[in-house]
Amino acid sequence: MTVNSGGSGRQNDEVFDFGIVGYRPRWLRGIEAVARPHDPRLAGLVGRTLRHVWLVWDLGADEWFADCPVLLDFGDEQVEINHTRTDDLSITFNSIDPHQPLTWPTSDGFQLAWRPEPIAQLEELRGQELRHASLLEWAGGTMADGSVALGFDFLAGHLTIYNALDENGFLFGEPGRNWREHVL
């Protein structure tokens, strides 16, 4: 369910805005670097209702374009999650308007648009109250060890947004034993 982004032509991820007006990712690596600035705000989402999960959709291929951020809309607070390389994570808040068009800024010719809950498992989470959020650290004995994911535990399901080796990936259900969970 993910898209291989190997041909995206990105040159400098620090200034690359993914064709999204107003988006300025802030790349961090490691659990402590991610936790320090984001723990309080992510913990503040507890008790809120998930209104939408917005994904960028590749209209030509009719599939999720997993290079772009995933937006979790909790009404007055929107968390924007994006993974790149093998261990870079950006978490931003309230900087992206999914009602605005986006244009992939390279010559790849992708036709992209924001879509709310285009995947059935995401639709099942819409309208659910967040019980807790967590940072998850991969410890599976692979090159991905130390990469950080975000876990969201809802009344009727669990969503993990993880680094799928240079793009976002989803896991539905409780995180497995290869993840060290840091509940916020």
Image: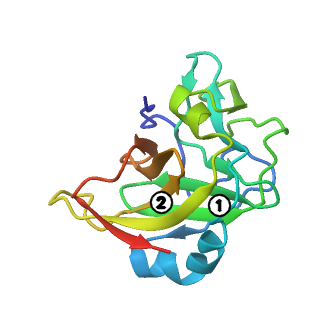
Three-letter code for the amino acid on which mark 2 is drawn: Leu
Q: Residues within 10 Å of mark 1 (few under 14, many from 20)?
A: few
x, y percent for residue 162: 42, 52
Single out the mark in the foreground, 1 or 2. 2
Extreme-left residue of the structure: 141
Is 77 drawn above or below residue 55 in the view shown? below
Residue 15's mark? 1
| Quadrant in which the N terminus appears | top left
x, y percent for residue 31: 40, 75
Can residue 81 be spotted in the picture?
yes
Q: Secondary structure at mark 1?
A: loop
Can residue 106 be spotted in the picture?
no
x, y percent for residue 49: 70, 53
Name which quarter of the figure residue 141 lies in.
bottom left
Three-letter code for the amino acid on which mark 1 is drawn: Val
Residue 150's mark? 2
x, y percent for residue 21: 80, 49
Viewer-side residue, 144 vs 116: 116
Is 109 drawn above or below residue 167 in the view shown? above
